Amino acid sequence: MTCPSCALVNEKYLKKAKGVLSAKVNFTSGLAAVEFDETTINQKQIKEIVTKNGYGVI
């Protein structure tokens, strides 16, 4: 991520996803904390949301 608005964009799209209960993306650390319902969405789908926005996932 190159700017704070990048973090906000990722946070926005994560929060819109069905099954995501909460999402916080920290620009400074480059980390995201995502709480989700495993019966609705999985880690692979969450990673796809981030990569579709043009960002990498570790």
Image (spheres, rainbow, N blue to C red):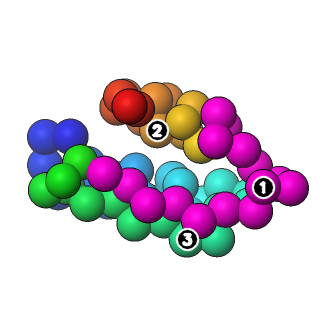
Residue range (magenta): 31-45
**Residue named by callout 2:** 50
SS at circle 1: loop
Query: Is there a contact, CB below 8 Å, between mark 2 and mark 3?
Result: no
Q: Amino acid at mark 1?
A: Glu
Give the CA separation, mark 1 to mark 2: 17 Å
SS at circle 3: strand
Question: From the viewer's perspective, is the residue at label 1 or at label 2 nearer?
Answer: 1
Residue name at image x 38 percent, y 55 percent: 32
**Residue 38 within the segment the image draws in magenta:** yes
Give the CA separation, mark 2 to mark 3: 15 Å
**Residue named by callout 1:** 38
Give the CA separation, mark 1 to mark 3: 13 Å
Q: What quarter of the picture does the N terminus occupy?
A: top left
N-term mark: 1 or 3: 3
**Residue named by callout 3:** 22
Residue name at image x 67 percent, y 62 percent: 36
Q: Can you tell which quarter of the image residue 8 is in?
A: bottom left
Q: Amino acid at mark 2?
A: Val
Q: Is residue 5 visible in this depiction of the protein? A: no
Q: Which mark is residue 12?
A: none
